[in-house]
């Protein structure tokens, strides 16, 4: 009997302890309701709902806010760069906590990584000497064969004339003749040589930094504005087989990339052109005895022909504006963009010359 009484007493105490938090919560809720009763009734009246429904909406809104905060915290943890920094955190502080990519992110290899520009400017070098150094440097590539590169230099005025036309007509098609064995038809006629068309695209980038005769100090901030006149923008021209470009679009691999470096255009009135032929992925591991000509997607002669064709169609006569008619090449370039239905492909082929 005493055991049963003890168990009943223990059960009553457990129920009393279990009910304490609920009693405390109801007490706190009641105090909250009493304190803000007027405001709650006013809010309910403005919302057009009763007081109980307003409380339900408030709880749902609080729950939704907690859920959004949890999701935001998770995303910030996984992808820190996709969520703006919290209040009080400056952009510089955020960048220090998580290093991002380079702000310039330019695909152009700077001229200073090819030539020692500071050394060139430290002592007098006429444009002709710089052009000779530029040619000698590229001739020494690929084991002294120069294979895979072409180069040239041109005055600033010629570059400006080309880019003025390119900004209006940034793309074109150039044919490259293909000399093959003559195939005689049953009628005794020799087949004409074939052509491979290349689609060219101009792209323009930011102006390079002003070159200096002294090496840049990595601990000194670079001024936001140059000390003298702005240099012309750096530009590139991509040559891609037309068939491949039709199939892959912007994902197509260019066979030749021309880059116009304008770093010395103000100091020496000189723009340096560098052409890089894309290596063939199939022969990256080519054996030493293999012909070096097979290691690139384009022959040296074809690359030079494309560069000459670019000059023929984009280096318009001096003093000619974009609205003035001149040579057949300029008219073909205009028609390609302005009247594509009237573009004469046969006339384009006539201007190409078969190379031996």
Image (tube, rainbow, N blue to C red):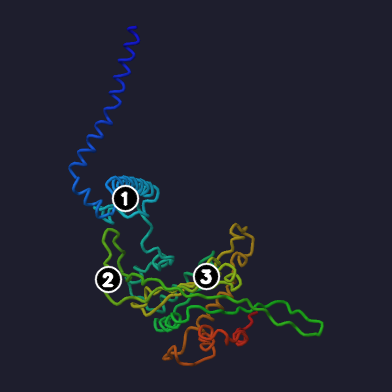
Q: Residue at x 33, y 46 (%)?
A: 60
Residues at discs 1 and 2 in contact (Cβ within 8 Å): no
Q: Are marks 1 and 3 in contact (CB under 8 Å)?
A: no
Give me the disc on residue 149: 3
Vertical relation: 180 (above or below) 47: below
* Total numbered labels: 3
Left or right of 284? Residue 109 is left
Distance between the alpha carbons at the discs numbered 1 and 3:
42 Å
Q: Nearer the viewer, mark 1 or mark 2?
A: 1
Look at mark 2 in the image and give the residue it sits on. Answer: 225
Q: Which circle marks residue 192 in the picture? A: none
Q: Quadrant of the C terminus?
A: bottom right
For disc 1, the marked residue is: 97
SS assignment at label 2:
loop
Mark 1 or mark 2, earlier in chain: 1
Residue in view at x 50 percent, y 78 percent: 171
Q: Quadrant of the N terminus?
A: top left
Q: Position of residue 252 (x, y in %)?
A: 55, 67
Q: Is residue 24 above or below residue 66?
A: above
Instruction: Give the mark toward the camera: 1 or 3.
Output: 1
| Residue 335 left/right relative to 227 | right
Percent coordinates x, y for residue 28 in the rendering: 22, 36
Q: Nearer the viewer, mark 2 or mark 3?
A: 2
Residue 56 occupies which quadrant of the picture?
A: top left
Q: Secondary structure at mark 3?
A: strand
Rounded to the nearest whole Å, what is the CA distance between mark 1 and mark 2? 28 Å
Q: What is the CA distance from the residue labelled 2 to the residue labelled 3?
A: 34 Å
Q: Residue at x 24, y 38 (%)?
A: 29
């Amino acid at each position: 009997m005493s055991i049963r009484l003890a168990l009943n007493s223990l059960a009553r105490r457990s129920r009393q302890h279990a009910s304490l938090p609920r009693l405390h919560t109801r007490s706190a809720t009641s105090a909250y309701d009493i304190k803000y009763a007027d405001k709650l009734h006013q809010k309910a009246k403005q919302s057009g709902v009763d007081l109980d429904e307003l409380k339900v909406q408030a709880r749902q809104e609080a729950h939704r806010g907690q859920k959004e905060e949890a999701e935001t915290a998770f995303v910030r943890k996984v992808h820190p760069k996709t969520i703006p920094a919290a209040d009080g955190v400056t952009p510089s502080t955020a960048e220090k906590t998580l290093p991002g990519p380079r702000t310039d992110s330019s695909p152009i290899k700077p001229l200073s990584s090819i030539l020692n520009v500071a050394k060139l400017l430290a002592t007098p070098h006429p444009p002709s000497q710089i052009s000779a150094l530029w040619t000698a440097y590229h001739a020494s590539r690929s084991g002294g064969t120069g294979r895979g590169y072409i180069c040239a230099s041109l005055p600033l005025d010629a570059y400006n004339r080309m880019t003025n036309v390119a900004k209006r007509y940034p793309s074109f098609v150039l044919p490259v003749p293909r000399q093959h064995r003559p195939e005689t038809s049953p009628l005794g006629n020799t087949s004409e040589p074939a052509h491979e068309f290349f689609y060219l695209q101009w792209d323009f980038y930011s102006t390079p930094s002003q070159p200096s005769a002294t090496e840049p100090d990595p601990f000194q901030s670079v001024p936001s504005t140059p000390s003298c006149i702005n240099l012309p923008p750096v530009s590139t021209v991509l040559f891609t087989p037309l068939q491949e470009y039709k199939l892959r679009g912007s994902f197509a691999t260019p066979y030749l990339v021309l880059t116009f470096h304008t770093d010395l255009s103000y100091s020496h009135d000189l723009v340096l052109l560098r052409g890089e032929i894309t290596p063939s992925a199939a022969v990256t591991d080519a054996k030493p005895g293999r012909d070096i000509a097979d290691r690139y997607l384009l022959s040296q002669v074809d690359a030079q022909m494309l560069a000459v064709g670019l000059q023929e169609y984009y280096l318009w006569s001096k003093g000619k504006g974009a609205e003035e008619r001149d040579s057949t090449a300029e008219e073909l370039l205009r028609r390609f963009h302005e009247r594509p239905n009237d573009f004469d492909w046969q006339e384009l082929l006539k201007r190409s010359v078969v190379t031996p």
